[in-house]
Image (cartoon, grey):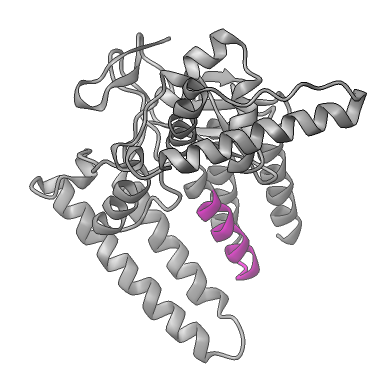
Amino acid sequence: MYEIRHAGAKGLGVFATKCIPTGTRIMAEKATLAVASEGQVFAASRALSDADKKRLMQLSISPVRRSSVLSWTEAAWHSTRQALSDVFNVSQRDGKAVARLPDLKTIAEYPTILSIFRNNNFDIGNGRQAVFDQICRHNHACVPKAQGNFNTTIGCFTIHAIQPIDADEEITLSYLVEHGALRESRQSRLREHYGFLCDCPACDITSKRGKDGEQRRRQMQMKLHAFAEEAAEREHPNVEAELVVMRELIQLYEAEGISGRELSTLYLTAADLAAKAGVKEEALRFSENGLRIDKDCVGTDSSMFHESLARVRAIGAML
């Protein structure tokens, strides 16, 4: 269904080997390394098998992060402190431990491992971040064809096609939480956190598609700000006004080709507002669309899908 190969200046990428329909689960992978904080990264990496460690060290390092993650002095301190901590923990368990301070190779690896973690980790919930071998090979696009989510039921991070993907097309994810942001904001976040600037069609403002998309996003940002100011002045929520904004947001996302759970959340919010406003047919249509998109994004075995299903049923009970 897919293969990992060179993607030009972006390095490695994931490409479809055949046409992939919307809703297809492309990957389901368990974490190579999972931690609750950066302070646990080095210890977790030392516990990896040689094969897993080798795969971890082959993941990308941000050029921005590479020179600024840690100095040699900091690396030596952190790795030594971790080694002593390991000794202490062992001695607390069985009273048998021999202190072995880290060598130069260990100290040299620490900044690289931390940089790899920062550049490749995914949020898997409950305050934990994880790094994956193959999933981390996906490159970014502001309007991606796939989406990743952690499935607690099966303990895997899954990748689903949220739009049809053609054979030989790159399977991209968005590294950003907010897909409707303006180009300048998106580029700033990507440069700061990942060390690159995006050149996807949505970011190419020399093209008609890029210009039109940026104009739509700018208009929506203005409407959202105006709505927020009006809402702050009202004593009680205006369901009808909120529903109008939700309709416009949905239109923006669909015009941009943006799908995924962000769009499904908009649909379910709009369904809830439509139900409260007494617009039954629209509430049902929005509910169906939101649940369908959610199913495509996470699969029916995901707890997130069942949470959305419960929400749809609660909306139906209001009608």
Side of 144 relative to 52 (left or right): left
Front-most of residues 236 and 4: 4
User: In this rendering, does residue 151 appear at all?
Assistant: no
Side of 178 relative to 43 (left or right): left
Q: Quadrant of residue 7?
A: top left
Magenta stretch: includes residue 262: no
Q: Position of residue 241 (x, y in %)?
A: 48, 76
Q: Magenta segment, which residues?
A: 265-278
Magenta stretch: includes residue 274: yes
Predominant secondary structure, magenta span: helix
The quarter of the image holding the N terminus is: top left
User: In this rendering, does residue 11 appear at all?
Assistant: yes
Front-most of residues 210 and 275: 210
Question: Which residue is at a point 56% across and 13% down the rendered structure image?
Answer: 52
Please tell me whether residue 42 is drawn above or below residue 126 in the rendered image.
above
Front-most of residues 6 and 108: 108
Front-most of residues 308 and 171: 171
Q: Position of residue 107 (x, y in %)?
A: 49, 29
Side of 34 relative to 112 (left or right): right
